[in-house]
Amino acid sequence: MCFAALLALVSPRLAIFVIWLFEIDDDLLARSYDDWIIPFIGFFLLPWTTLIYAVMWSVGTNEVAGFEWFIVALAFVADLGTHFGSRRYERR
């Protein structure tokens, strides 16, 4: 799990792929999401949000509640910043 956390600092997509490939933490993604389509779409559109939601799901009582939603919201803002920041950079 520590290796996946270090990969997340470099690239959340790489961390999601490694977690899925090696089924780290007893298949974190399968326990967090009911279907495979949500993590698949999240891999391409919102990688930080997908990864942080899965981690917050496994941290507590197998649900995201309270302050954990704030952390998921920060990941969502980071994803939006990544998308809009790259568009601003392309304009220059």
Image: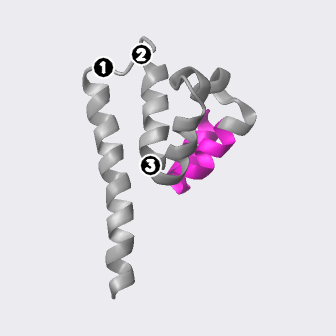
Residue 55 colored in magenta in the image: no
Q: CA distance from mark 2 to mark 3?
A: 22 Å
- Sequence-earlier tag: 3 or 1: 3
Pick whichever, 18 or 92, lies toward us: 92
Judging by the rendered image, the residue that carries numbered circle 2 is 60
Residue stretch rendered in magenta on the structure:
1-19
The residue sitting at the bottom extreme is: 92
Mark toward the viewer: 2 or 1: 1
- Residue at left 34%, top 36%? 72
Q: Label 3 neighbourhood size at 10 Å, few (<14), some (14-19), many (20+)?
A: many
Q: Which mark is residue 49?
A: none
Q: CA distance from mark 3 to mark 1?
A: 20 Å
In this view, the residue in front, 16 or 3, is 16
Q: Residue furthest right?
A: 22
Query: As shown in the figure, which amino acid type bears the numbered disc 2?
Result: Gly
The residue under label 3 is 46
Question: In the rendered image, which quarter is residue 16 located in?
Answer: top right
Which label's residue is closer to the chain start, 2 or 3?
A: 3
Tell me if mark 2 has few (under 14), some (14-19) or many (20+) residues whose alpha carbon lies within 10 angstroms of its own. Answer: few
- Tell me the distance, in whole angstroms, between the alpha carbons under discs 2 and 1: 9 Å
Mark 2 or mark 3: which is in front?
A: 3
Magenta segment includes 8: yes
Q: Are marks 2 and 1 in contact (CB under 8 Å)?
A: yes
Mark 1: which secondary structure? loop
Q: Residue type at mark 3? A: Leu
Question: Badge 1 is on which residue?
Answer: 65
